[in-house]
Image (tube, rainbow, N blue to C red):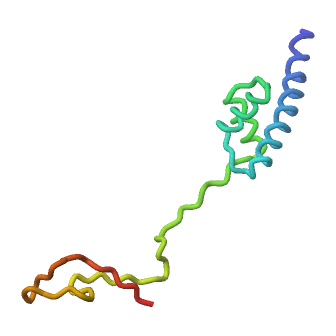
Amino acid sequence: MLGASVLPVDANARDAQLSSHIRQVFRTHRERYGSPRIHIELREQGMRCSRKRVVRLMREAALSAKRKRWRSGSTNKGKRLLVTGTLLLPGIHAMSPRTSERNEIVPLLLL
């Protein structure tokens, strides 16, 4: 009977200690690390615990990693590009109404 009452107290103390280490790693990495990365970090520091235990302690402490924001758009945000195939560059003359020496698409930047 004595062993049964000692184990939960000891487990609670170890959980509290591990939880403080988890919070420290979580804040060190700007709240971006989730349970798998924190588990790896703790293992590299020499602490032995299961990944599921880290998940449980993080859930109890309401720690969840910030997700990467999804960005839409392009590098030319705010700039409109007009693509035309009818522009002839200087020095290039049309052979016939629809052909030239260099048929290419030329982007024009509109401000």
**16 with respect to 95 (left or right):** right
Q: Residue furthest left?
A: 96
Tell me if residue 110 comes above or below residue 6 in the rendering. Answer: below
Q: Residue 38: x and y, percent?
A: 71, 37
**75 with respect to 52 (left or right):** left
Camera-side residue of 77 and 59: 77
Camera-side residue of 6 and 79: 79
Q: Quadrant of residue 23?
A: top right
Location of the C terminus by quadrant is: bottom left
Q: Residue furthest front?
A: 91
Q: Residue 50: x and y, percent?
A: 70, 25
Camera-side residue of 80 and 73: 80
Q: Quadrant of residue 39?
A: top right
Residue ID at (83%, 30%) = 15
Tell me if residue 96 comes above or below residue 76 in the rendering. Answer: below
Total residue callouts: 0
Residue ID at (14%, 82%) = 100
Tell me if residue 31 comes above or below residue 50 in the rendering. Answer: below
Q: Residue 32: x and y, percent?
A: 69, 50
Q: Residue 26: x and y, percent?
A: 76, 45
Residue ID at (47%, 76%) = 76
Camera-side residue of 49 and 105: 105
Residue ID at (72%, 41%) = 59
**106 with respect to 29 (left or right):** left
Location of the N terminus by quadrant is: top right
